[in-house]
Amino acid sequence: MRKTSTTLNPVNASENPGQSSTPRPRTQRPRGETSHTASSSTHSSVLDRSGIVIVDKPAGMTSHDVVSAMRRLMRTRKVGHAGTLDPAATGVLILGIERGTKFMTHLVANTKSYDATIRLGFATTTDDAEGEPIPYLRDSEENSSQATAGFLISPATRERLSVLLSEPERIDRAREQLTGDIMQRPSSVSAIKVDGRRAYDRVRSGETVSLPARPVTVSTFDIRNVKTATIDNGDDNNGEEGVTVIDLDVTVDCSSGTYIRALARDLGEILGVGGHLTALRRTRVGSFSLDDAKTLDQLRDEQSLAEQRIRDEQVTGETPRASLSYSLDQAITRSFPIRHLSDDEATAVSMGKHISGSEMKDVYAGVSADGHAIALMKNEGKIAKTVFVARPATLS
């Protein structure tokens, strides 16, 4: 989410040569000095308010709903998030506040971890429980009247499910095919843009969308528990009591851009029974986990306590806000390797200038002697260039 910031420029009293040259009394502070002081104070307070808040997103809210709530709780429009969570999903949602919004792009690339439940037995139109059920039919069953006679799960699919329960190693072998560096076809209802429009918008308007596969890394795909559930089998069960499906509780560590619902879909296809996601909880983004997260109710309580303190202490000039989880300095240094900068290097980097390179690989944090994260940097040959300047000279 891109936002704009306004920098207050000090007024120089000598800029208008047409003004009277009558000298001011020595006790009067020049207008330029007053404006500069106010500007510096504004810049400092913006940096003090900049950082991240880690929210444990509840089910039923969109990521944008959480952003809107945080704008009220932090009393600023400058709020953005790193990595969208679907409304039904819960867990870690990282929000950038003030200049922290510009840091979100660099957090999106981090590895993410999830706990999820995958149901084997049938697919859905959205690859999760929100979509319409789709009977899973193999090519050999397409012309079978028995397979299409109002059943959600055909007799042949039920037989394969029974085999999977008796031979769970089949599930494990299929899981291994979806672990490591793989090509994954994103869900058709993802937020990926197709010719300028979100894929899910096109699906909602009746279009058929098939997105191309792309490389992702699934470093961990562990099955924690295998259980069964009995569900209706469509058409009032055709006189049956129900049918047994398989639920897998799984843990996944993956690269950014991996769709857990697509893993559920693909696992079901490999096993020949269909599959979809029924529950999803994000437990970690990079180095930030549920242990760092706060609920929205906790954040509302923080703001209420801040309001009460301001009233009780009769504080003026302070706005009641919920507190940051981490300052911008803390968030950057926790997320990236640190390169310590000399004073001259820190000054140059704050102005976006190049400095000599280092032996560090990938992106790292350039940190000043006083512990401030000045910028994210990356080596290019013998020089180090800024990727994101956290503390530009204009705000120091």
Image (cartoon, rainbow, N blue to C red):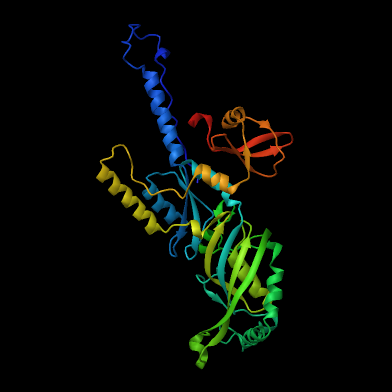
Above/below status of 175 relative to 338:
below
Q: Residue 100 location in percent, x, y? A: 50, 44
In this view, the residue in front, 171 or 50, is 50
In this view, the residue in front, 233 or 59, is 59
Q: Residue at x 31, y 14 (%)?
A: 27
Q: Residue at x 65, y 63 (%)?
A: 185
Q: Position of 202 compared to 11: left or right?
A: right
Q: Residue 329 location in percent, x, y? A: 52, 42
Task: Name the residue furthest right.
Answer: 381
Above/below status of 181 relative to 340:
below
Instruction: State how many labels appear.
Output: 0
Q: Residue at x 44, y 63 (%)?
A: 58
Residue 295 placement: quadrant: bottom left
Residue 60 placement: quadrant: bottom left
Q: Is residue 154 visible?
A: yes
In this view, the residue in front, 293 or 19, is 293
Q: Residue at x 56, y 85 (%)?
A: 244
Task: Name the residue furthest bottom.
Answer: 239
Q: Position of 306 compared to 191: left or right?
A: left
Q: Residue 291 location in percent, x, y? A: 50, 59
Above/below status of 256 relative to 328:
below
Q: Position of 223 compared to 238: left or right?
A: right
Q: Residue 330 location in percent, x, y? A: 52, 45
Above/below status of 347 relative to 244:
above
Residue 192 placement: quadrant: bottom right
Q: Is residue 124 visible?
A: no
